[in-house]
Image (spheres, rainbow, N blue to C red):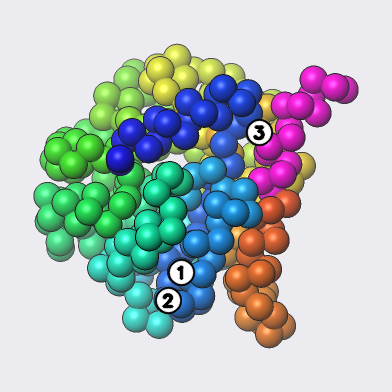
């Protein structure tokens, strides 16, 4: 499936006239069993696409919530191999929801790009975001992923000019990922009015659906972005629910999926509401 699974999902959403809700969670947070339970529950709670972080000790693009999630997972012994195992178990119950892995280069280099791409595709992953490999150096990884029909998603940012966008989109497939704010995740808020022209520019450069991430925490903010983009990515707000559930001894899975449900409903209804106002 791989790239075909991503393409099929965005084609279906376009036919429905709505944006995708992309839910980011950290693999193995707060532990393997609970992380798998959350992963399996995401589609039913409204996630159209899943972004699955593989924990790394120095996640430089992440704000404090996702940094803490990575450390919780690492403390429980989570690894890249176990992340792929988790995807394999997810695929036993769901063959249609795209999964995009998100992480950092070091574990991939240690494994070898070709080996990683082969293992990830066999597990059922559809794409990859690597924060710390610039597009100018992405060809070896992109080639390895292409051989397994997996997508590489290189990030566009508010500072990416037209020349830079051409370089970024040359090896990007599946969908384009636009980082709505400068800085790390979970700190600033995205402004849909500011984001809109950038989304149009990225869409024109790539010819792909554009998903917007970073700075989206509330249903209201998610709905606003859903009116101008093809997808809305929420991560920090979800991993914070893990931490808060642990702090008050609540059921982690139920709390996370409840948050997913509220955000997904906002994204799903955003364009309908804008037409009836």
Q: Secondary structure at mark 3?
A: helix
Front position in the image: 38 or 110:
38
1 and 2 marks in contact (CB < 8 Å)? yes
First of labels 2, 3 by sequence position: 2
For residue 239, above or below residue 248: above
For residue 228, above or below residue 78: above
Q: CA distance from mark 2 to mark 3?
A: 32 Å
Numbered tag placed on residue 225 in the rendering = 3
Q: Which residue is mark 2?
A: 32
Q: Residues within 10 Å of mark 2 (few under 14, many from 20)?
A: some
Residue that appears at 45% across and 14% down: 204
Residue that appears at 24% across and 50% down: 121
- The magenta segment: 263-277
2 and 3 marks in contact (CB < 8 Å)? no
Q: CA distance from mark 1 to mark 2?
A: 6 Å
Where residue 178 sits in the image (x, y, percent)? Answer: 48, 34
Magenta segment, principal secondary structure?
A: helix
Question: In the figure, residue 199 lies in which quadrant?
Answer: top right
Where residue 168 sits in the image (x, y, percent)? Answer: 32, 28
Q: Secondary structure at mark 1?
A: helix
Residue 137 visible? The answer is: no
Residue 62 visible? The answer is: yes
3 and 1 marks in contact (CB < 8 Å)? no
- Residue 260 lies in the magenta stretch: no
Numbered tag placed on residue 36 in the rendering = 1
* Quadrant of the image containing the C terminus: top right
């Amino acid at each position: 499936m791989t790239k075909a699974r991503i393409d099929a999902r965005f084609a279906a959403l376009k036919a429905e006239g709505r944006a995708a809700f992309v839910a980011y969670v950290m693999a193995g947070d707060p532990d393997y069993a609970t992380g798998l339970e959350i992963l399996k529950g995401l589609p039913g709670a409204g996630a159209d696409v899943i972004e699955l972080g593989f924990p790394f000790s120095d996640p430089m693009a992440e704000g404090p919530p996702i940094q803490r999630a990575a450390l919780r997972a690492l403390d429980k012994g989570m690894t890249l191999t176990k992340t792929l195992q988790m995807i394999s178990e997810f695929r036993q119950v769901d063959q249609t929801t795209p999964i995009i892995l998100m992480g950092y280069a070091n574990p991939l280099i240690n494994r070898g790009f070709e080996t990683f791409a082969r293992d990830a595709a066999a597990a059922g992953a559809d794409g990859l975001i690597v924060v710390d490999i610039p597009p100018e150096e992405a060809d070896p990884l992109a080639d390895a992923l292409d051989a397994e029909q997996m997508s590489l998603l290189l990030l566009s940012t508010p500072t990416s000019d037209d020349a830079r966008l051409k370089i970024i989109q040359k090896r990007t497939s599946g969908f384009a990922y636009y980082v709505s704010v400068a800085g790390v995740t979970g700190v600033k808020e995205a402004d849909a009015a500011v984001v809109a022209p950038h989304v149009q520019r990225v869409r024109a450069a790539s010819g792909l659906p554009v998903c917007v991430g970073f700075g989206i925490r509330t249903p209201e903010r998610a709905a606003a972005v859903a009116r101008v983009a093809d997808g809305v990515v929420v991560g920090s707000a979800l991993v914070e629910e893990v931490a808060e559930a642990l702090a008050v001894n609540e059921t982690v899975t139920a709390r996370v999926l409840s948050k997913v449900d509220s955000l997904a409903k906002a994204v799903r209804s955003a364009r309908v509401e804008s037409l009836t106002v």
